[in-house]
Image (cartoon, grey):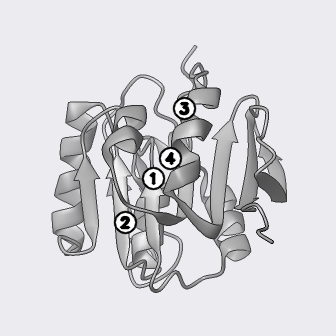
Amino acid sequence: MNAHNPKHRNQVRIIGGSCRGRKLIFQSAEGLRPTADSVREKVFNWLGQDLSGQTVLDLFSGSGALGFEAASRHAARTVLCENNRRTADQLARIRTEFGWQNTVEIICQDGLHFLRQTALQFHTVFLDPPFQWKNWAQLFALLRPRLHSDAYVYIEAGRLPEIPDWLSIHREGKSGQSRFVLLRHTPPEHG
């Protein structure tokens, strides 16, 4: 059963930053369930309201709610990776509508493939895959070298994966069927 909250059917609003209150319209797609406003508000309170200077990755972008929220909060560069062509095209339209062509990059490809080929390093990463997605061990292996020291990794899932020892829990919560956690990258100490 694909239940929708009628209040949020195919649209979410940006809750903070320079584009606060603007709506993101998206098309229905299998596995697409945008992060609720209340959860995004909590997560961005945990992250701090201003992401100036940060490079942010929204690896399973879907509606783009998390990545566009970061862009609205002045992230220097935001990469939205989405493997559904129609959804990625809609994200590109929103990017243009909001005037973010210079700061937001839309990548239409599988998230694991993107991590294999990118040289970018990220300060904040959002991981909100479809509930049935299970390839966490490979994702974590590919993600680790792409993180700045002290980077944040946000995960939202029906059931949270086993967290590797190089990530520590900073905050966590639950909303409906979703569990979410904000993790902190803890690189090994040298010396």
Q: Amino acid at mark 1?
A: Asp
Q: How far is disc 1 from disc 4 in space, using C-alphas?
A: 20 Å
The kind of residue tagged 3 is: His
Q: Determine which residue is flagged by label 3.
A: 4
Count residues near mark 2 (Cα–Cα under 10 Å), then give few for <14, some for 14-19, many for 20+. many
Does residue 80 appear left or right of residue 34 in this picture?
left
| Vertical side of 55 occupied by 107: above or below | above
Left or right: 76 as drawn, with respect to 94: right
Which of 189/133 is in front?
189
Q: Is residue 136 left or right of residue 178?
A: left
Answer few, some or many: residues within 10 Å of disc 3's Cα (few below 14, many 20 plus, some between 14 and 19). few
Give the residue pinned by disc 2: 78
Judge whether 168 appears above or below 82 on screen.
below
Q: Give the distance between the C-alpha atoms of the residues marked 2 and 1, in whole angstroms.
A: 8 Å
Residues tagged 3 and 1 counted as in contact (Cβ below 8 A): no
Comparing marks 3 and 1, which lies closer to the viewer?
1
Indicate which disc residue 176 carries: none
Percent position of residue 68, x then y:
40, 64
Assess whether mark 3 and mark 4 are in contact (beta carbons under 8 angstroms): yes
Q: Which mark is residue 58?
A: 1
The answer to the question of whether label 2 and label 1 lie on touching residues, with beta carbons closer than 8 A, is: yes
Residue that badge 4 annotates:
8
> Marks 4 and 2, how far apart in space?
24 Å
